[in-house]
Amino acid sequence: MKDENNIEHGKEMGYLDHLSELRNRLLWSALVFLIFFVIGFFIEDKIRNFFLSHVDFTLNLISPEEILWIIITIAFIVALIGTLPFLCVQLWLFVRPGLTKHEQRVSLIYIPAVFFLFIGGLAFGYFIFIEMILPFVLSLNNGMFDTIFTVERYFKFIFNITIPFAMFFELPLIVMFLTSLNIVTPQFLRKTRKYAYFILVVIGTMLSPPDFIVQFVVIIPLIILYEISITMSYTVYRKKQKKHQEYMNEN
């Protein structure tokens, strides 16, 4: 009984140590987020001017809190982008002891991939917004009314398009990670493809104006991302099966 109690006590201490380590890494990530958030306050005017450089109409400020909301939101996005690689590194360091050397090298590649895919999603969403969604919305007026654009609504419009695309661009990596943990399989992704397509169509419709061409342009990249996710899942799954087979042959 005494030995069993010692074992249980050791396991409990081990769990507490892991939780303490995870908490410390998250606290460091929060500190980095705060630092980048402050940096965002100093560079938000340059980012705001970049967004404004692509519009040929006047934006109106209705209330003082609008500009404050924009400054805080841009600073938050800067902090999110800046903290993302650091957070990924901290999570990788946390799980590294439980990985083989090969798994450590492979999983390390995820870190820059997460960052660049997020940036790519933001850029793609902004391109779709500027080139297709905004011109379509402006064309609906057709000179019938005097259009007044408020600063807050314009930037909300941008963020509501770009942020979801940045998230969706992470889908292949998330699927690869879940496949490596045996949570999903390529067979499951293929089996549920029609349901996934339906969800993506609904999301694409919500992100874009009610125009078939614009919705088509928005939905197609989401479907392509899902198909890429299936391919990446199959690659990870096949490698795991191959390693498992080699292990069984050796034993």
Image (cartoon, rainbow, N blue to C red):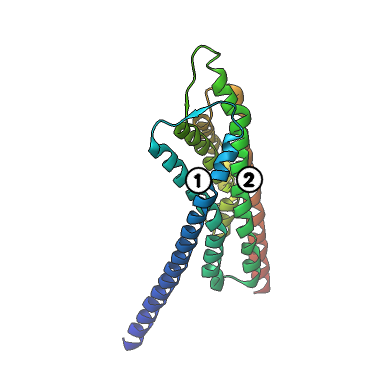
Residue type at numbered disc 2: Gly
Q: Is residue 200 visible?
A: yes
Q: Height in image: 138 above or below 66?
A: above
Which element carries disc 1, helix, strand or loop? helix
**Which corner quadrant of the image does residue 14 belong to?**
bottom left
Alpha carbon separation for disc pair 1 and 2? 17 Å
Q: Height in image: 154 above or below 69?
A: above
Mark 2, residue position? 120
Packing grade of label 1 (10 A; few <14, some 14-19, many >=20) is many
Packing grade of label 2 (10 A; few <14, some 14-19, many >=20) is some
Residue type at numbered disc 1: Ile
At horizontal 57% and vertical 39% (from top left) the residue drawn is: 49
Q: Nearer the viewer, residue 65 or 112?
A: 65
Q: Nearer the viewer, residue 148 or 81?
A: 148
Q: Position of residue 52 (x, y in %)?
A: 57, 35
Residue at the farthest left position:
1
Quarter of the figure that contains the N terminus: bottom left
Q: Nearer the viewer, residue 158 or 145?
A: 145
Comes first in the chain, label 1 or label 2: 1
Quarter of the figure that contains the C terminus: bottom right
Q: Position of residue 237 (x, y in %)?
A: 63, 56
At horizontal 47% and vertical 67% (from top left) the residue drawn is: 25
Q: Height in image: 216 above or below 248?
A: above
Mark 1, residue position? 74
